[in-house]
Image (cartoon, rainbow, N blue to C red):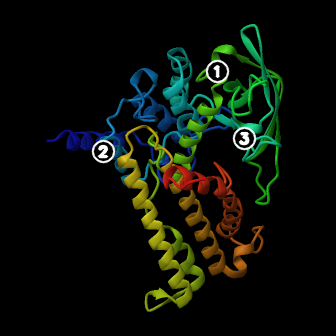
Amino acid sequence: MSEHSEFRAQTRAWLAENCPPGARGVGQTAWGSRKIDLQPDVALWLERMAQKGWTVPTWPKEYGGAELDRELYPILIEELKQIGARTPLTGRGVNYIGPTILELGTHQQKAKWLPPIARGDGGWAMGYSEPGAGSDLASLTTRAELDGDHYVINGRKTWTSDAAHCDYIFVLVRTSPEKPKHQGISLVLVDMDQPGVQIHPIQLISGASPFNETLFENALVPACDVIGGVDQGWAVGKRLLQFERSTHAGINTSGSQGGRTSESLLPGKIKPYIGLDNGKLAEPQVRKTLIQHEIDYFAQKLTQQRVIEETQARAPGFASSAIKLSNALITQRADEILMQAMGTQGVGWDTDNFSKDETQATREWLRQKALTIAGGTKEVQLNIIAKRVLGLPD
């Protein structure tokens, strides 16, 4: 038996025995927050996979991983999908800041932060954008002043996703304001459980409040928690964004692909509203539109898989921008197709006259308008594709 076949057989047997029923199919997924109670099976699944090192299977064992060979990693993902297992752990810890620390952190920083991240011990927020520094992120003004062995942080971040439920936040701050704006920036790790950090939710059109404004008023950060070196934050922050965009694109290799289906769910959602005629959708125009979407959807999935297999590092480079953008556009197009097929049932807001699935579809349609903003706007991604992927002149 080959190494790959043996690993597949052992993995299949272990997953069958250790993946609880309540951690299969659609449902809650752990992302590290200590402020959200996990369902018993979800908590058990996280514990077992963390002990196995499979929450971050490619990380070194000393930092909570399994040092899984890149050729064996896809086999683990395939077996997770085969039984409908949810990813045991996702979020900005394992997907964004963890890989950044692994690549750019000191040994002491890795030893301090990576094992808890691999266990799902603490949820992470992202402190990048500010009211006056969005796409022009280098204009940020949040300051960090060294005071003994700590930095004192003052400033404001906005659009900090899930901050109300997070335990930590990685923040871009200005440590040398006298330097040019792309210099003098550092990436620091902040414990949010302190008086100097205040969270204010931002209400969205979808009715939810995943985004927040985060205020820092004399918040304290140990000087040893600057990642990548003082005043080196611009390069560190850009590298982290590559990990983020890889996650949005579905091409990261931390393990978060586990449990995701490669099949499109759109045809099944449309059928109840259109009906069938001799086994086909009754309306030809809807059928034509859906066929084109399915072609685009599966092409996207094949491209994702190709990039994963071609990736030599733990996250791809600039190609992540292209796949992130196309993934967002395809997802938004699916929402539009579903809304058109649902007609008046696609604009429901309460459950008095609409089903739970219908109101959920409306909220998803609105929420996913942000996909071409989050993780870098559509325009930013197009610029990166033009300059870094296609090599076009400025």
Per the model, the C-alpha gap separating discs 1 and 3 is 19 Å
Cα distance in 3D space between marks 2 and 1: 41 Å
Query: Outermost residue, bottom direction?
Result: 278
Say left or right for 86 vs 180: left
Question: Which of labels 3 and 2 is toward the front?
Answer: 3
Task: Please identify, in this view, whether the residue under mark 1 or under mark 3 is nearer the observer.
Answer: 3
Of labels 3 and 2, earlier in sequence is 2
> Label 1: how many residues lie within 10 Å, few (<14), some (14-19) or many (20+)?
many
Q: Residue at x 77, y 68 (%)?
A: 349
The answer to whether residue 298 is left or right of residue 339 is left
- Residue at 80% across, 30% down: 142
Q: Amino acid at mark 3?
A: Leu
| Residue at disc 2, secondary structure | helix
| Position of residue 300 measured from the top left corner of the image (x, y, whole percent) | 46, 62
Q: Position of residue 379 (x, y in %)?
A: 66, 57
Quarter of the view holding residue 348? bottom right
Type of residue at label 1?
Answer: Val
Of residues 166 and 82, which is closer to you in this image?
Answer: 166
Sort mark 3 into few (<14), some (14-19) or many (20+) by Cα contacts within 10 Å: some
The residue wearing badge 3 is: 137
User: Residue 255 versus residue 323: which sits nearer the camera?
Assistant: 323
Q: Is residue 324 visible?
A: no
Residue 313 in view in this figure? yes
- Marks 3 and 2, how far apart at CA: 45 Å
- Residue farthest left in this picture: 1
Q: Earlier in the sequence, mark 2 or mark 1?
A: 2
Q: Which mark is residue 360?
A: none
- Mark 2 residue type: Arg
Query: Which residue lies under the disc numbered 2?
Result: 12
Q: Give the number of the disc on residue 226.
A: 1
Q: Residue at x 54, y 27 (%)?
A: 101
Q: Position of residue 330 (x, y in %)?
A: 55, 66
